[in-house]
Image (cartoon, rainbow, N blue to C red):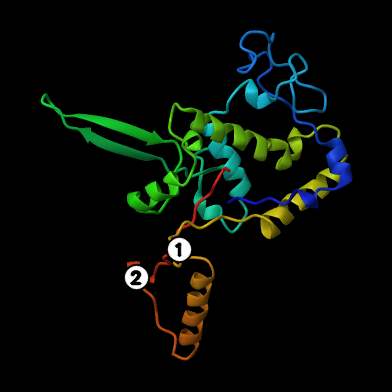
Amino acid sequence: VVKVSTCLRSNTQWKNLSQQQSGRGVPCLRCRGMCTGFEPHSWRKVCKSCKCSQEDHSLSSDAEDDRKIGRLLSDSKYSTLTARVKGGDGVRIYKRNRMIITNPIVSRKDPTFDTITYEWAPPGLTQKLAMQYMELIPKDMQPVAGTEGASYRRRQLMRQLPIYDQDSSHCRGLAESEIKLMEDFVKKYKSDALGVGEVALPGQGGSAKEEGKQHDKNVAASKPPVSANGALSDAPTGMEYVSPL
């Protein structure tokens, strides 16, 4: 699970941070026509017209989601989970993994297929293990395309990864000295508080994995160094993923 410790934020930053809200005028999905359109509050993350949140007015796009996570992971030890955007001046996006499950439907006529698309799935896993992971998520929260679960995931991303927590240009009223403080804050939480979870069967990850690494180090220390050719057997077996939840 991606973890960002908000306790590092200073009082001054809390006072000055204010999102430059997008989506002005977009109808509220919760009010169903009663809201005249999204009108950002000056400092609260709600609509002045109906008091509902921004997430209730508009959902982010796939590209926006991947940019948010890419911005979070860039310049961290998890930057390998991102890819550089061509012509994007160094901008990196999250390499999202989608999963498509196709189940044949047997009938007397020509066979048909029932296809389920998961908008996000843990990368680097077998389909069987990935499905085991998905089955542990409540049915109404599974990120299946076109369902409430997919919408829930996007709403969580909007709430948990606001752009103004990472980019000072989206903050209002910061002095030059405070901009520098914020940049230092972002660097600090990326180095000290940012974490990426591991998907593994019980007994195959966590402390057992770390003990295995330590054992390998001890063995390697007792032997002369051997040149590695990058064979598949040399690759680590741990599976890592980024969770938006």
Residue 67 point in image, percent of width and height: 57, 38
Q: Quadrant of residue 50?
A: top right
Residue 220 point in image, percent of width and height: 46, 85
Q: Which mark is residue 202?
A: 1
For the image shown, how many numbered marks are present on the structure? 2
Q: Nearer the viewer, residue 17 or 152?
A: 152
Residue under pointer 2: 233
Residue 18, compared with residue 56, is above or below; it is below
Callout 2 amino acid: Ser
The residue sitting at 40% across, 54% down in the picture is 124
Residue 108 point in image, percent of width and height: 10, 26
Residue 46, compared with residue 210, is above or below; it is above
- SS label for mark 2: helix
- SS label for mark 1: loop
Q: Is residue 88 visible?
A: no
Residue 222, compared with residue 175, is above or below; it is below
Residue 115, compared with residue 92, is above or below; it is above
Q: Nearer the viewer, residue 106 or 118?
A: 106
Q: Is residue 107 left or right of residue 124?
A: left
Q: Are marks 2 and 1 in contact (CB under 8 Å)?
A: no
The residue sitting at 66% across, 40% down in the picture is 160
Q: Is residue 102 visible?
A: yes
Residue 206 point in image, percent of width and height: 52, 66
Q: Quadrant of residue 27?
A: top right
Q: Quadrant of residue 229?
A: bottom left
Whichever of callouts 2 and 1 sits on the residue coming sooner in the sequence is: 1
Q: Is residue 236 left or right of residue 171?
A: left
Q: Nearer the viewer, residue 124 or 209?
A: 209
Callout 1 amino acid: Pro
